[in-house]
Amino acid sequence: MLDFLWHLRGTVVLDMAMPDEEVFDRLHAMLVGQEKPVTPDDGRQIGFDAPLWRNLYGSNWRAMVIYDRGDFWLDRQNGRRVLRYDLRSLHTFIFCLGAAGLFFSAGSSGSLEQGVKLAGLALGWLYGMNLLLASLRVPRLIRRMLR
C-alpha cells in the first residue's frame, strides 16, 4: 500500500541488437561498481541484497547507496525488449524514521505540535532529499550503463 515510499521502479527500453548476456554482464559490472553484492542470477534476472548496516562507512556518494535490495529483469512490452527494475530503500527509510523520532523527542519538550512539525521536517529532509537524489541519479546510471 505505502511501498511507493521505499521502492523505486522503472523500465529502460533496450537496443534490440544488444544480447541478453551483455545486458546482464553490464548490470553485474554496474552493481559491483556500486558496491552491491550480486545475488545469483538465472539468466533472466539479476539482483542484489545489501543491508544498509553492511557497510555504514562505505562510499556514500554512490548513486545506489540508499538501496538495500534490488532486482533487474528483462521483459517484453509492445514488441520491444525492456529492462525492468525494482529497488528497495526500506532500511534507509527506517533509519530516517528513527532520526525523526529523536527530533520529535527533542521538539515535543515545548509542545506536541512542535514535536510533530520538527519530526516531519526531519523525515522530509533526511529521507526526501536522499530519495530525490537517488530517483534522479539511478535511472541515469542505468541508461548510461546500457549505452
Image: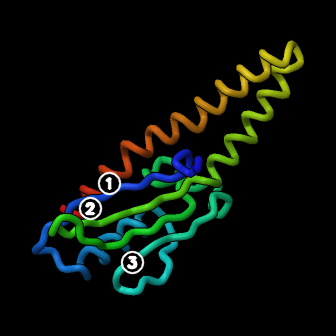
Q: Which residue is mark 1?
A: 141
Is residue 56 or residue 45 the one in the foreground?
Answer: 45
Which numbered disc flags the more N-terminal residue, 3 or 1?
3
Q: Is residue 85 above or below residue 139?
A: below
Q: Quadrant of residue 51?
A: bottom right
Query: Furthest-right residue in view?
Result: 109
* Image position of 22 (left or right of 70): left
Q: CA distance from mark 3 to mark 1?
A: 18 Å
Residue 83 image point, x, y percent: 29, 66
Which numbered disc flags the more N-terminal residue, 2 or 3?
3
Residue type indicated by callout 1: Leu
Local crowd at mark 3 within 10 Å, few (<14), some, or many (≥20)? some
Residue at the spot x=67%, y=27% of the render?
120
User: Label for residue 145?
Assistant: 2
Q: CA distance from mark 2 to mark 1?
A: 6 Å
Residue at the spot x=29%, y=72% of the render?
75
Residue type indicated by callout 3: Gln
Local crowd at mark 1 within 10 Å, few (<14), some, or many (≥20)? some
Residue at the spot x=34%, y=64% of the render?
84
Q: Quadrant of residue 43?
A: bottom left
Position of the C terminus, as image quadrant, is bottom left
In this view, the mark in front (2 or 3): 3
Q: Is residue 134 above or below residue 39?
A: above
